[in-house]
Amino acid sequence: MFPPKYAFTLLIPFRNIFLSPKKLILRLDLKENHNVLEIGPGPGYFSTHVAKKLKHGGLLLLDIQQEMLDLSQKRLERMGIKNVD
């Protein structure tokens, strides 16, 4: 388990070198009407991008750490993204 107090390190854009949200969406071949389960989203690095792609679908986040889900929810709310549970 990743310590939630260091979750901010998971949001550093440097991660794009290894796998960017754009590349992930292309690899998953996501369509606007898909419903997606994201397991272990942490603070939601990919979640915001995936949820925006799912204009007529939805995103369900599942994590064993409630703190990480809370961080994800705060980020999504700040961005006005509402199709996530």
Image (cartoon, rainbow, N blue to C red):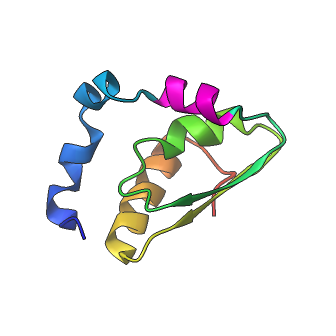
Q: Which quarter of the image is occupied by the C terminus?
A: bottom right
Task: Give the answer, above or below, for where 72 lies relative to 81.
Answer: below
> Which image quadrant is residue 40 in?
bottom left
Q: Is residue 22 magenta?
A: yes
Specify start and end residues of the magenta stretch as a single range: 21-28
Which residue is depicted at the point 60% across and 30% down? 27
**Which residue is more in the foreground, 20 or 78?**
20
Query: Is 7 positioned to the left or the right of 19 in the image?
Result: left
Which residue is depicted at the point 21% across and 48% down? 8
Which residue is depicted at the point 52% across and 24% down? 22
Secondary structure mostly seen in the magenta stretch: helix
Position of residue 38 measured from the top left corner of the image (x, y, whole percent) = 56, 57
Position of residue 63 measured from the top left corner of the image (x, y, whole percent) = 45, 70
Position of residue 33 measured from the top left corner of the image (x, y, whole percent) = 84, 41
Query: Is 7 positioned to the left or the right of 65 in the image?
Result: left
Q: Is residue 4 magenta?
A: no
